Amino acid sequence: MKYGFITALVSSIILTASTWTSSEETILNNYGEMIFRPDSLTLCIVTAEGDTLVFADNPFAENSDVFNVYRESAYFPHQNYWVIYVVEYEWEEWLLVNGVNGRIDTTISEPMPSPDGSRLLCAHKDLEACFSENGIQIWRIDTDSLVLEFSDLDVFWGPRQWNWLGDSVIVFEKTFYDWRSHSPKILPGRLELSSDGVWIPGDPESWE
C-alpha cells in the first residue's frame, strides 16, 4: 500500500515537472561538458576546479526522509551558477551550485538575477498546502560564494509576481489568504536597498 502511494506520488512529480525536464534537456545539450546524466537517476556537474558533484535520485524510497528527485532547472553563465530543483516527500527546494568551486546554497525558489547580474532574487508562496515556506530571499554574488543579504520566511502572506525594478528595488504582490472565505487579498509590496546596504520594506508593518 505504501509502495503504491509513493509510486503515485512519483508519477505526479513526473507530470508536474515537465517544464523542468524540458529545461534540463536544453541545458544538458548546451553544456554537456560541464553537466551530464550517466543514467536517468543521476545528475553530475563538473566544476571548473575539476571536481564532479553527484546528485542521485531516490524516488522509490519507503523512508520519506531520503526521498528525493533532482532536476537541473537553470544555468546562469555570467555568474557561473547552476540551479537544481529538488523534489522531496512533501517539500521542494532549489540548490544554487557554484560552477567554479562546487559550493552549494539552498534557497526557496528558482532565482531571478538582477539586471546588473550582481544579485539573485528568490520568492515563494505556499498559502494553501503550507508545506513550504512563504517569503523572500536576496543573495549577493561575491567572487567565490553567495551572501544572503536578506531573508524573511516568517511572513503571514505569500509573494507573487516578483520582479526587479532596477538593481536596488524589488516589487511584488503580497497575497493574504482568508481561510473563512477561501479568497485571496492582494496588496502591493516593495523592497529597496539603502545606501548602507540594507534592504528596507516599503511597508514594515506587514513584515512583523
Image (tube, rainbow, N blue to C red):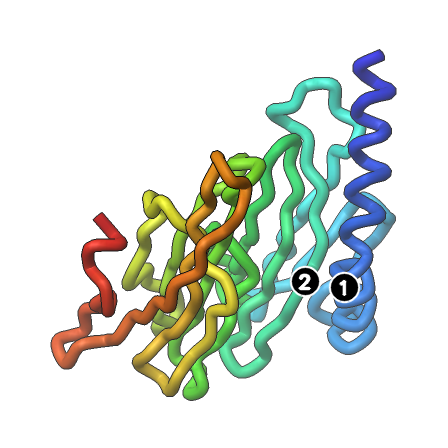
| Rendering coords of residue 144 (x, y %) | 39, 69
Residue at the image position 86 percent from the left and 48 percent from the top: 40
Residue 109 drawn above or below residue 117? above
Query: Which residue is farthest front?
Result: 181
| Picture quadrant where residue 87 is located | top right
Residues packed near mark 1 inside 10 Å, few (<14), some (14 to 19) or many (20 plus): many
| Rendering coords of residue 115 (x, y %) | 45, 86
User: In the displayed structure, does residue 115 sit left or right of residue 27?
Assistant: left
Residue at the image position 39 percent from the left and 74 percent from the top: 171
User: In the displayed structure, does residue 3 sit left or right of residue 202?
Assistant: right
Residue at the image position 32 percent from the left and 51 percent from the top: 152
Q: What residue type is labelled 1?
A: Glu
Viewer-side residue, 187 vs 166: 187
Label 1, label 2: how far apart the Cα atoms are = 6 Å
User: In the displayed structure, does residue 35 sit left or right of residue 198?
Assistant: right
At numbered mark 2, what does the secondary structure look like: helix, strand or loop?
A: strand
Residues packed near mark 2 inside 10 Å, few (<14), some (14 to 19) or many (20 plus): many
Q: Which amino acid does label 2 sit on?
A: Ser
| Rendering coords of residue 202 (x, y %) | 24, 69
Question: In this figure, what is the number of numbered marks?
Answer: 2
Image quadrant where one finds the N terminus: top right
Marks 1/2 in contact by CB < 8 Å: the verdict is yes
| Rendering coords of residue 190 (x, y %) | 32, 71
| Picture quadrant where residue 81 is located | bottom right
Look at the image and tell me whether residue 35 can be seen: yes
At numbered mark 1, what does the secondary structure look like: helix, strand or loop?
A: helix
Residue 24: mark = 1
Residue 96 drawn above or below residue 57? below
Name the residue beneath numbered marker 2.
Answer: 73
Residue 137 drawn above or below residue 128? below
Mark closest to the chain's N terminus, 1 or 2 = 1
